[in-house]
Image (cartoon, helix red, strand yellow):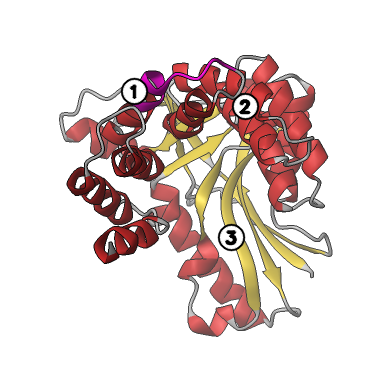
């Protein structure tokens, strides 16, 4: 599907988001690849959405030749736009660069940068949160917008983002490896390849990335891209949980309960579930329901079991509904 690319000069400020100094030159390279999570497409008028079919992420690109930062947004289009449609698309995109998505924050595997507007709002609210040292303004300067409109036939509106991730992964950046692995696993912008996804996760885990450790453990647990091996998964879940990944606590507790990769220890299993439950993890809450229903490591207590199952259901664990029905029917 053809794409239309809108690009213009972005502004970057340093030090103070209220009265910061304009930053120029190669220092802007650290912002290359920063992008929004939200899509401008969702905010387009109905008339434009009939021909513009997707895309719309706000992304910053460092131009090495001009030593300037540019804001770009790429849309998928079903056909060529009329002059009036193009004018409307530019206007609505500029609106998002100025006060919509452009007034939020932007991310890449390198970290996060706040817009001028968001940083100012945080500062004026009196919060003690560190807002950073660089701030971007996606809205081009009135006197020098240097708007470029380009149409091509590349497949993915996220092609540049993926290239950034590949470059970061090749350079050994562990979070880029995680993000790239998730795209391979989901087939998002890349051909679905579970083996490559696992390799990315494993390489990230080897670099001590706790997200990589969790996803490596999960892959070994489920057999995603690698031979299923719950015993090996234990070590990775343990590292992830120790690094603050709440999602790792439920499978880690299950390893302790079932003796996968470690001696069975019901007390440690329950400790994992209780810690996860305090953090709001629905699966850990449901596991505590199981423990009280079947007397695993605790005295059986149908009332407590029902309470935990209901909490799990409220937290988003749909499987708890079956357990609630089972207890109520008994």
Circle 3 Cα neighbour tier, 10 Å, few/some/many (<14 / 14–19 / ≥20) = many
Marks 3/1: CA–CA distance: 45 Å
The residue depicted at 35 percent of the width and 41 percent of the height is: 294
When asked about the image quadrant of residue 165, the answer is top right
Residue contact at pointers 1 and 2, CB within 8 angstroms: no
What kind of secondary structure does the magenta stretch mostly adopt? helix
- Choose mark 3 or mark 1, whichever is in front: 1
Q: Earlier in the sequence, mark 3 or mark 1?
A: 3
Residue 104: % across, % down: 40, 46
The C terminus is located in which quarter?
A: bottom left
Residue contact at pointers 2 and 3, CB within 8 angstroms: no
Asked whether residue 154 is in view, the answer is yes
Residue 148: % across, % down: 69, 56
Q: Nearer the viewer, residue 295 or 255?
A: 295
Residue 27: % across, % down: 59, 21
Residues in magenta?
A: 262-271
Marks 2/3: CA–CA distance: 29 Å
Q: Which residue is mark 1?
A: 271
- Choose mark 2 or mark 3, whichever is in front: 2
Q: Which residue is mark 2?
A: 212
Residue 264 shown left or right of residue 154 in the figure: left
The residue depicted at 79 percent of the width and 70 percent of the height is: 1
- Choose mark 1 or mark 2, whichever is in front: 1
14 above or below 66?
Answer: above
Q: Nearer the viewer, residue 12 or 307?
A: 307
Q: Which residue is mark 3?
A: 56
Q: Nearer the viewer, residue 243 or 255?
A: 255
Q: Secondary structure at mark 1?
A: helix
The residue depicted at 80 percent of the width and 61 percent of the height is: 155
Q: Is residue 268 located in the magenta-colored stretch of the structure?
A: yes
């Amino acid at each position: 599907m053809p794409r239309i690319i809108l690009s213009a000069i972005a502004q970057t400020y340093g030090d103070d988001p209220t009265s910061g100094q304009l930053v120029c030159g190669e220092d802007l390279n650290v912002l290359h690849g920063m992008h929004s999570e939200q899509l401008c497409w969702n905010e387009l008028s109905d008339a434009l959405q009939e021909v513009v079919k997707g895309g719309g992420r706000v992304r910053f690109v460092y131009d090495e030749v001009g030593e300037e930062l540019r804001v770009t947004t790429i849309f998928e289009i079903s056909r060529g736009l009329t002059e009036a449609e193009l004018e409307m698309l530019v206007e609505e995109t500029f609106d998002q660069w100025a006060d919509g998505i452009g007034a939020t924050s932007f991310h890449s595997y390198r970290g996060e940068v706040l817009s001028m507007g968001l940083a100012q709002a945080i500062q004026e609210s009196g919060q003690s949160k560190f807002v950073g040292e660089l701030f971007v303004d996606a809205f081009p300067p009135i006197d020098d917008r240097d708007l470029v409109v380009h149409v091509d036939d590349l497949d993915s509106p996220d092609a540049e983002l993926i290239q950034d991730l590949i470059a970061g992964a090749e350079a050994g950046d562990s979070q880029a490896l995680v993000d790239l692995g998730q795209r391979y696993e989901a087939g998002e912008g890349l051909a679905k390849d579970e083996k490559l996804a696992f390799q990315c996760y494993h390489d990230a885990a080897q670099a001590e990335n706790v997200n990589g450790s969790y996803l490596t453990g999960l892959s070994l647990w489920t057999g995603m891209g690698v031979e299923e091996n719950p015993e090996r998964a234990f070590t990775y879940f343990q590292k992830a949980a120790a690094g603050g990944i709440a999602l790792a606590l439920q499978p880690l507790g299950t390893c302790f309960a079932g003796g996968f990769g470690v001696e069975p220890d019901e007390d440690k299993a329950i400790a994992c579930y209780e810690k996860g439950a305090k953090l709001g993890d629905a699966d850990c809450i449901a596991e505590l329901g199981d423990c009280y229903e079947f007397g695993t490591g605790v005295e059986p207590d149908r009332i407590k079991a029902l309470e935990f199952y209901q909490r799990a259901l409220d937290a988003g664990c749909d499987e708890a509904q079956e357990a609630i029905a089972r207890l109520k029917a008994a």
